[in-house]
Image: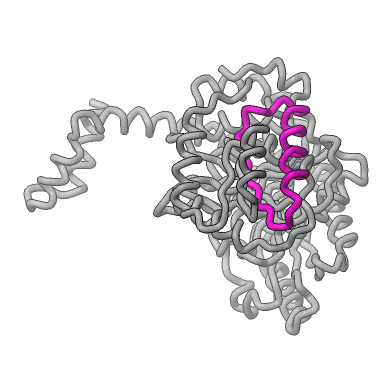
Amino acid sequence: MVSLDKFYNGNVRALSQLISAIEYQQNGVHKTLGEIFPKAAGSLKIGITGPPGAGKSTLVNSLAHQFIDSGNKVGILAVDPTSPFTGGALLGDRVRMNEFPIDGRVYFRSMATRGSSGGLSAATDNATLALGAFGYDIILIETVGVGQVELDIIDSCDAVIVVLVPESGDSVQTMKAGLMEIGDVFVVNKCDRPGSDRMAADLRYAIDSWKRFDEGWIAPVVCTEAINGKNLDELFEKVQTFVKYSKDSGRFVSQRRQQISKKIMSLLQNRFRQEFLDQIDTGGKIESYIDEIVGGKSNPFDVGEKLYQQFRP
Amino acid sequence: MEKKVRVLLAKPGLDGHDRGVKVIAAALRDAGMEVIYTGLRQTPQMIVDAAIQEDVDAIGVSILSGAHMTLFPAILEELKAKDATDIILFGGGIIPDDDKTELEKMGVAKIFTPGAPTEEAIKFLREAAGSRSPKE
């Protein structure tokens, strides 16, 4: 069990070590998370996602500054990929951060995906609880550079910003399902480049074409030049407008309820999965089944059924 | 889950030559470590704050400017002030042998100079991180 005394006293090392314990799924960490869960409920979680190199980190930097300037404390989780070959990772999102105050109003943690493929690491959602309970009222979550279907971010956030660039595709690309559906606010960054007006127009058209589950909010498209500070105030304002809308309309609460429901299911799934795997893994049984299958005496479907029956007679 | 070695790599001061630190970053990454690269122009305080937030085993700094006898002690001081002396400090750069000896006496765990094979840094970090006991 991770000790919470120092954590509650505002010790940053205790927070950092708790996040590590979450990453390693250390024994007892779920109990700790259960204890801090209610204290994290008040923080606002904003996700920033989009393809690699679109400017997510630079926008996170500017949003963080805007939020601290408005009197908030900001926790940032930035996810970068783990190598499937070596298990190593280069976590480089800090490079874009500049001159945060050193008085603890900003906390920045880099996370490696460690095998997850949904754009976040398995520990990211729980890490938001640690940040929230520690007192960060704004939590910014930056995903890995994503394509079209790495959408885990919607299960961890109250608001999602999708960042694209003028080269992100034509009007058909913007109509494809997945990434283009999850933005509450869209950004076309690097809008000094040619094609940004067309990209923004295509996006607006696509947004209009989705059959929305929420008729009350049409996601705005903001054209920014993050590196030159252009239109960042507009982005900040649109994010705040969305959050206000979401809270007033009841969407915020219903979204959180959905997330909690998914979280319970995923906790259960992981637990059952682990228990099942532990049971069938014993004594190298799997290898002998594979021998049978490769030798033509059985097939994956029959073996799957047999193992399931053993587990639940 | 197997323990990952986490390392923060930084360039302190105004020295902008980052080829060396990027070579080390790639080598440590390929050795299965999680490398957090902070980029250029970091102050000792920024480096130590980042190391604490990132919960790293070690801080590696690259100094090619000649300011090593100022910057390394400043980072050691900062680690002391933040009660984080259990985090390993190592470094590399154009550092004369005499200075190297003195820095290692002060508490810098290891200094690598030009020509050192990257395998040496990997081996050093695996051993040092493996025998480390983080402060609660």
Percent coordinates x, y for residue A242 in the rendering: 82, 52
Q: How many marks?
A: 0
Residue at the extreme right of the image, as rendered: A70
Residue in the foreground of this view, choosing between A281 and B97: B97
Rendered view: B24 above or below B105: below
The residue positioned 59% from the left and 25% from the top of the image is B134
Percent coordinates x, y for residue A269 in the rendering: 44, 34
Residue at the extreme front of the image, as rendered: B98
Q: Quadrant of the C terminus of chain A?
A: top left
Asked if residue B78 is among those painted magenta in the image, a careful observer would answer: yes
Q: Quadrant of the N terminus of chain A?
A: top right
Where does the magenta region start and end?
B59-88
Residue in the foreground of this view, choosing between B92 and A129: B92
Percent coordinates x, y for residue B120 in the rendering: 46, 47
Colour scheme of the picture? one colour
Percent coordinates x, y for residue A304 in the rendering: 23, 41
The residue positioned 41% from the left and 51% from the top of the image is A86
